[in-house]
Image: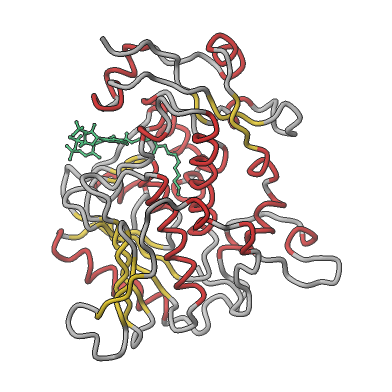
Amino acid sequence: MALASGVRFAERALLRPWALLRGTTLGRTEPAAGGGGDGARRFGSQRVLVEPDAASGVAVMKLRNPPINALSLELLTELVISLEKLENDKTFRGVILTSDCPRVFCAGLDLTEICGRNPAHCAEYWKAMQELWLRTYLSSLVLVAAINGACPAGGCIIALSCDCRVLADNPKYRIGLNETLLGIIAPFWLKDTYVNTIGHRASEQALQLGSLFPPAEALQVGLVDQVVPEDQVQSTALSEMARWLAVPEPGSSQVGPIFFRSRAPADQEHDAKGHRRPPAEAARRRHPELCQLRLQRLHPEVAAGVLGEAPTEERLRAVLPARVLAKPILVGTVALEDSSPVFAHLKLLRALCFAHLPRRP
Ligand SMILES: CCCCCC/C=C/CC(=O)SCCNC(=O)CCNC(=O)[C@H](O)C(C)(C)COP(=O)(O)OP(=O)(O)OC[C@H]1O[C@@H](n2cnc3c(N)ncnc32)[C@H](O)[C@@H]1OP(=O)(O)O
């Protein structure tokens, strides 16, 4: 949610996602649907459509990377840029995140970005993913997720990074962190995000089992705040947004993501002169491990030994999309440096570990 109003992401140099973009048109501006009589203009990029309403200070941001809104490097990058653009525009205080693709909110990481790619690409991809997480989780805007489709894995993380979640009541629209079923072990920050939302025991169970919750269960466990008929998702999200924005000067109080989402000692939040650090820098100080993530090409046996048991080919074949498996798999693993202070906590650092599988016959 909103941070102190004067606090913005000054540390832009750390977030230079446009450098990652290849062949993407950004900043296209066109009249908003419905006339845009208030002067608000629709803008966006190839994969992110932004419909701003200057009068209410709320923008609707739609993911449109068909068919399933997989988080490709381009989509991650364009999301970061679009959010940054709105954060920099004082007109806007809230964003509703939703999908422009039927039946899917977001399928999570684009597995084609990490299968059969070289370590440099995987590292670039992993970094972009973390940047989006930091950008959403520590956003100075109120973020409401209008979840109008399936919401597994990375899609769920995006939703969890929002202040509030409204899910369409369709049993096919399941939500949760199913990473373990893919042989991906949740990094600590992903686990923490789950715990912060649904509590320790529920997270322990859900993460380890890779549970995907249908709407009623998602509501019961606290993963979403409202479940409503599909045609009411958008309007409910707008009502929720109004409720959050009704709080005077959200973020100028001590109640905001920094308050709730960190347990940082004061010296990580403030510099020697007592000035509040930019949120991205504060987050990096709290979690130096984030900066230390390195892609290492580990020998499969080493990966299995260091990172725990590698998933079997049968298991992966059962869950991974056929298109992904058609490519030579993997890739290696993302792990923390040996020198990381948390290296001992294996459960937390088994970040992204796939088995080394032979080419599909
Ligand atoms: C804030 C930053 C993010 C932090 C992220 C932290 C880490 C997250 C880890 C992950 O996200 S790993 C990815 C896990 N994702 C999944 O398990 C989703 C798998 N997909 C599905 O469950 C379904 O596809 C769906 C999303 C429910 C949609 O079902 P639908 O029946 O509508 O479509 P499909 O026929 O299944 O798929 C269409 C097409 O898309 C391919 N595909 C599906 N998922 C992915 C994916 N994640 N990456 C790449 N490609 C994917 C699928 O293979 C089909 O391809 P085809 O060529 O048409 O056969």
Q: How many marks?
A: 0
- Where the C terminus falls, by quadrant? top left
In the rendered structure, the answer to whether residue 55 lies left or right of residue 334 reads left
Where 233 sits versus 172, above or below?
Answer: below
Where 49 sits versus 212, above or below?
Answer: below
In the displayed orientation, state which residue is furthest to the front: 23
In the rendered structure, the answer to whether residue 288 lies left or right of residue 70 reads right
Q: Residue at x 39, y 20 (%)?
A: 329
In the rendered structure, the answer to whether residue 236 lies left or right of residue 91 reads left
Ligand 1 located in image quadrant: top left
Give percent across and percent down for residue 183.
Answer: 42, 23
Nearer to the camera, 198 or 281: 281
Nearer to the camera, 340 or 245: 340
Q: Residue at x 25, y 27 (%)?
A: 323
Give percent across and percent down for residue 209.
Answer: 38, 27
Which color scheme did the rendering employ for the protein? secondary structure
Q: Residue at x 30, y 42 (%)?
A: 107
State which quadrant residue 175 falls in. Answer: top left
In the displayed orientation, state which residue is furthest to the right: 272
State which quadrant residue 356 falls in. Answer: top left
Give percent across and percent down for residue 106.
Answer: 30, 47
State which quadrant residue 127 falls in. Answer: top right
